[in-house]
Amino acid sequence: MSGREVLSDAAWRERVLAGGVRPRRYGSWYVAEHRIRSMRSYGQTILATSIGNPLIYLFALGIGLATLVDANLGDDAVQGVSYLVFVAPALLGLAAVMVSAEEFTYPIMLGFKWNPIFFGMNAAPITGGQITNGILISVLARMVPTCVIYFIAMVLFGAVPSAVGILMIPIAVLTAMSVGLAIMAYTARIEQDKGQMALIMRFGITPMLLFSGTFFPLSQLPVYLQWIGWISPLWHGTELGRVISYSLAEPAWLTAVHVLYPAAIIVVCWRTSQRVFTARLNK
């Protein structure tokens, strides 16, 4: 005699619906947990870059380039501060942007095409919007500790003169998420890999790094190149970090723009990503 429980259709339906309550309620967190567990496969790389990058960049700029700049221009070499203090907010923002660029490109393509786990998630009671939110949460879980480690290294190198400089961490996260969500809104639409993600890095991230006032004030660029900085979230985040770090003088309206512009990108691209995920997973 079989010990299998015999249930009516109505009872099975009720059991199935009950089983989907938790995924429907906590789907975003389940997706985030999956992504964070997946990161363990390249955890050594994450750990090495999180610790190695700030040490290398700060040592190279603090002991190397900054020494030369300060020796020739004085201790208030750029905008009234040492070169290392000037460049530190940009380096923190750049570190966060690189994390977002890594997590919002190939892992998104992986989930849709090479290992279509997003379709499996969507087959369970997890919506496209929840998958989007879960990815966002998982990226934050990697990005925030990276920024904290970077900030500690900056403090040890004497690159943070103000006590409120710790606010550069949320500023860097704001900057990076605006860049990353814009990338995800685009990457989620890609059906075939034709090198688009390499193009994002070469013709998106790299020019943004070079023309966003990272290593020198944006005003030093020719006017016809400055627009790249004006539309770059990295420039807005860097300038806002400099206001916090060493009280860079600028109009209040411009400081407000530095906050509102990346925030607006986040809202628009987040909602766009949710719509793209939902539409693609329910074709």
Image (cartoon, grey):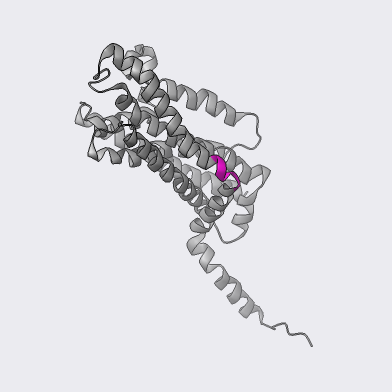
The vertical placement of 76 against 131, above or below, is above
Of residues 40 and 218, the one nearer the viewer is 40
Q: Answer with left or right where residue 264 lies relative to residue 282.
A: left
- Residue lying at 51% horizontally and 46% vertically, measured from the top left: 275
Q: Main secondary structure of the magenta part?
A: helix
For residue 163, what is the image quadrant?
top left
Q: What is the total number of numbered labels drawn onto the structure image?
A: 0
For residue 59, what is the image quadrant?
top left
Of residues 245 and 223, the one nearer the viewer is 245
Q: Answer with left or right where residue 218 lies relative to residue 47.
A: left
Q: Is residue 104 visible?
A: no
Q: Is residue 168 visible?
A: yes
Of residues 233 and 12, the one nearer the viewer is 233
Q: Residue 270 at what x, y percent from top left? A: 45, 44
The vertical placement of 227 against 263, above or below, is above
- Residue lying at 25% horizontally and 23% vertically, measured from the top left: 81
Residue 206 located within the stretch drawn in magenta:
no
Q: Residue 197 at what x, y percent from top left? A: 58, 31
Residue 44 located within the stretch drawn in magenta:
yes
Q: Residue 122 at what x, y percent from top left? A: 59, 55
Q: Residue 228 at what x, y percent from top left? A: 40, 21
- Residue lying at 40% horizontally and 28% vertically, measured from the top left: 58
Outermost residue, bottom side: 1
- Residue lying at 55% horizontally and 73% vertically, measured from the top left: 18
Which stretch appears magenta? 41-45
The vertical placement of 225 against 272, above or below, is above
- Quadrant of image for the N terminus: bottom right
